[in-house]
Image (tube, rainbow, N blue to C red):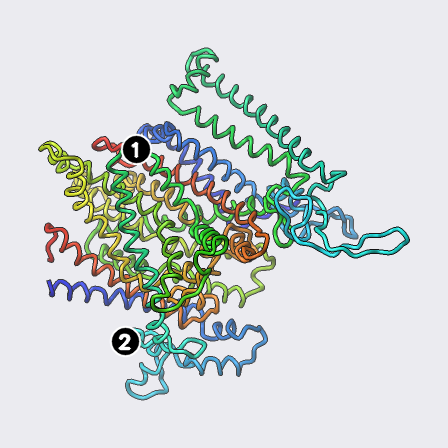
Amino acid sequence: MIAYIVRRTLYAIPILIGVNLLTFVLFFVVNTPDDMARIQLGVRRVTAEAIEKWKAERGYDKPKFFNDQAQGTARLTDTIFYEKSVRLFVFDFGNADDGRSIRHEILTRMWPSLALQLPVFVLGLIAYVSFALLMAFFRGTYLDFGGVVLCVAMMSISGLFYIIGGQYLFAKVWQLVPISGYSGGLDAGKFLALPVAIGLVAGIGSGARWYRTVFLEEMSKDYVRTARAKGLAETAVMFHHVLKNGMIPILTGVVVVIPTLFMGALIMESFFGIPGLGSYTIDAIQAQDFSVVRSMVFLGSLLYILGLLMTDISYTLVDPRVRFT
Amino acid sequence: MIPVVLRTDALLWLLVAAVAAYIVHVRRSPHLLVPWRRVTRSASGMSALIVFLVFIGIGLLDSIHFRPALETEDEKGATVYAVEAISVLDAIASPLRAHRERTYSAPLATRAYAKETIEIAEPGGRTRQVREFPRLIWGGAHLESEDDAAADISVRAVAGLAGALVAWCAFAWTLTTWRARAAGRTLKEEWRAIWRAETETPWWSILLTSGALLAVACVTLALCTHYHVLGTEKVGQDVLYLVLKSIRTGLVIGTVTTLVLLPFAITLGIMAGYFRGWVDDIVQYIYTTVSSIPSVLLIAAAVLLMQVYIDQHPELFPTTAQRADLRLLFLCIILGLTSWTGLARLLRGEALKLRELEYIQAAQAFGVRDRQVIARHILPNVMHIVLISLVMEFSGLVLAEAVLSYVGVGVDPTMISFGTMINAARLEMSREPIVWWILAAAFVFMFALVLSANLFADAVRDAFDPRVKVGGLARA
């Protein structure tokens, strides 16, 4: 088991290197630091000195890959690539354009993000699976048909409308919850109730519909027919056989997102003013803060790869047929 | 007038040509005709197709651009053309475009949304200033008294409905006669068969959907020349015009993106599955790397970089329309480059399965070259997967545009799209009384577009997915 995990982890390293190279090419080769400086400093008629100063402040004035003015290993380390990309591997994200440490920001902002995303994830999983089981149990009836129609209709609505509508109704008209904002501790519940509810409702269409197809596919298999043939009640078939076996395809889709819960929900956080990583990212995109965007790209892919690793491990736990090889 | 071909126009029409070629191909190949016949038997699928075709029609009308001739002539007597290119849709909807108010007004209103200071001339040559809701410049301007507005609107709406009824009857009669002749029945028998859902194609659902569409269209048409049916937005533009223009943006994003994604997904996916070994390793590595980057961030990064490029090279984009168009095309390319991984993974799996089948092994044993095996034996047998995921992808892309525009990495701010509309309207939610009509209009049109695409995609999937037939798994 440990050997398997180690091997899978080693496999993740080339992918991270690939992500790193790709972002480096996007941010420093396709567009030079000079271009970035110009867009940051705003005006077209910006002086060359201002650009040089901007670059020096951020360490973008070094050579890209190879510094022939330095000595020894500094030839490789005193470069943009080393300073900005290789350092990401040890979680040294550097500073944002406003001078604050990105690492510190990430460490403080990941908790509000998690506080929003974790309930959405857990409650969502329970709600979608139960709804899907209900539809699969009553398959072919009007209840199932109505459920599917509802799902398709709900997934055809842009998430923005759920947020705008929910915010308007619950926060403005009925004034049940604050419109936006956040505070730590127990008070957070009051701020998080609406975003969590909206997150649940917005995802139910695609979620429940997908789980329904998973269950229906499971139900068409031979072992279900055997279970029915030996006289098991339909409820026993559903909960003991279909639900258990359906967990395998469900795990593929679900486990991989667990680590990325830390990344937060982009739109939701920015609408509700939750100081998480999602709103941090949006602010960085809108302020064109490249160092933050770069760090978030790296962090996001790291968490995704962690999710893939967890998926592989979870398979071996739920499916005895899968062996680590 | 001088025709202008924008890049996205060309790609959109290229796609139309490709779809037309595909239809011709399907009509000639019986094995493809069978699943498509199944699609035409789905009532919800056909209703959705009708609605979707209306959207496509509007989008295509908006994709023929030209520079209209101005009425003035230059000193040599030659005609002068407008700098700005307009589309056929703009030309058709020119009353909507021309009827600009000063600012917000509610749907079908005769007065503006906000109070203004108005000077009223009093007897004796003096003027008095009052704060009140000013009359609109165009909305209901033909009325002598505003009290007639309700009556006038009802008369026009009824006239529109009557027109719709006439048009619908004509359509229903033509359809029934055509079907009756084909089936060798009398008109009456055919009519009864249609409404009892005894015909193979669910003509009843097509008739119902087209009836509803005609009613909406005709009432809108009857009202839109003298009123703002969906109100006006901040700078007084008719919201109906904005939503009509948004359709094209949504269509371009949903379709052109798939054009970008296809070559990557098909070549890499099939190669990985067919050749296995190191090719498979490399392809898997590429798509894991690409999909591990959060797609919004990758898109954001790429769009920011394109923004820098556009700012650096203003000389390449003489007009704002061209700049907006190029930005739209670039957005499609970026979306395509980030979303090919899902389909590639599916195709890899399918190719892995297919290459073990006997007919492929036989072809290999006969010494058929790999390229030929892929083109002749693998590709046609994975096309149903490609088709299903393309139609499924469409609605997701239309929805993604709205979110990306909100984040600020979507289409050009000057381009009319659902995303930019929602974004602008969102800020007005806090006004009292609330400006609801812009969001409502964007919601209804976007919902109709995405829902029809989703329902049609479902019908296509049910008809093409071989798993659906197994074990009585037919749709409820």
Where residue B315 appears, x then y in whole percent? 58, 64
Left or right: where does residue A161 sit relative to residue B99? left
Left or right: where does residue B440 sit relative to residue B22? right
Chain ID at mark 2: A
The residue at the far bottom in this view is A71
Please determine whether, in this image, residue B244 is positioned above or below residue A277: above
The residue at the far right in this view is B124
- Image quarter hosting the N terminus of chain B: top right
Left or right: where does residue B114 sit relative to residue B7? right
Q: Residues within 10 Å of mark 1 (few under 14, many from 20)?
A: some
- What amino acid is found at the position of numbered circle 1 in the picture? Arg
**Label 1, on which residue?**
B475
Is there CB contact under 8 Å for labels 2 and 1?
Answer: no
- What amino acid is found at the position of numbered circle 2 in the picture? Val
Secondary element type, mark 1: loop
Q: Residues within 10 Å of mark 2 (few under 14, many from 20)?
A: few
Where residue B340 appears, x then y in whole percent? 34, 52
Q: How many marks?
A: 2
Mark 2 vs mark 1: give the one in front.
1
Camera-nearest residue between B78 and A231: A231
Where residue A96 appears, x then y in whole percent? 41, 75
The label on residue A90 is 2
